[in-house]
Amino acid sequence: MVVFPSAKINLGLRITEKRPDGFHNLESCFYPVGWADALEIRPAERFSFQSSGLTIPGGAPPGSVPPGGAPPGGTASEVSTNLCVKAYELLARDYSLPPVEIHLLKAIPIGAGLGGGSADAAFTIRALNELFGLQLTTLRQQDYARTLGSDCAFFIENKPTYCYGKGDQFEEIPLRLTGKWIVLVNPGLHIATAEAYARVRPARPATDLRELLQLPIAGWRTTVVNDFEASLFPGYPQLSAIKDKLYELGALYASMSGSGSTVYGIFENEPEGSNNFSPYAVWQGELS
């Protein structure tokens, strides 16, 4: 089975309070975009994990397969700490899953605010559920995904969603950007989560994000805010420069996604000039 875990962007991101457990509560709208990895899972005699494309920190090196995979009766963590492997382990604790071969072609930039690793984990859960007829409900799949990361559960349904709590609680939102175009620019900066949160001051916004997103998109420029921009842009001026350039190219709205470092612009029609961002990684396409 081959599936294509896709990235997401944040339409607005407000840090509302710090929780007693050390995490932060937030509100955001997660919106899927077409920048995607490719993930193949198939039954095998022994478990193995292989990756190609972008290098995955802490996982199996691109192009490598540990000899023989995990030993019979061993755990997949002996092969890799990749989230796809952790997702397999998670289900294998509760269900009699046969060994599988997993091949991940990594294309979504890592540590980029796009949720690529979380998407890989969630799509692994979805694929295993379908491949082996586990008959897991959407809610059950989301429960499994939440144990792997705060935004993993979003990718089970992978549709525009208002998110709150740690980013793992959801409400439907009547928002569709179908037909609009998006340009995503990733300058290759890896911004640690701790650094991103260090200078953010949690505060409850005066207006609910769901109300702001009902405004015309051009009105989002001054109302729909990513709180991390104020804390990160001074130290990373290239991020604000990308955002300014997207507006120069005609973006209706531009913002950083998540805690960075990808910056995106939403356009009415297919934009020209996105090649001006070389040597950064750029993806553009139509939103659905």
Image (spheres, rainbow, N blue to C red):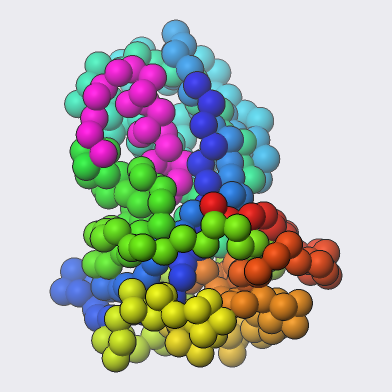
Where are the magenta residues, as a range? 118-138
| Location of residue 95 with respect to 87 vertically, above or below | above
Q: Quadrant of residue 14?
A: bottom left
Residue 13 magenta-drawn?
no
Q: Residue at x 27, y 67 (%)?
A: 164
13 on left or right of 153: right
Q: Residue at left 46%, top 67%?
A: 10
In this view, the residue in front, 152 or 111, is 152
Q: Nearer the viewer, residue 223 or 261?
A: 223
Can residue 231 be seen from the camera position used here? no
Prevailing secondary structure of the magenta residues = helix
Residue 56 higher or lower than 31, as above or below: above
Task: Give the quarter of the image for residue 243.
Answer: bottom right
Residue 122 picture location, percent across and down: 39, 41
Residue 72 image position (x, y, % from top left)? 36, 12
Q: Is residue 183 left or right of residue 273?
A: left
Residue beneath the point at 82% across and 69% down: 273
Q: Decide which of 182, 269 is in the foreground and name it.
A: 269
The correct choice, above or below, for 247 with respect to 141 in the image is: below
Q: Is residue 123 left or right of residue 286?
A: left
Considering every residue shown, the one lying at the far top of the view is 45
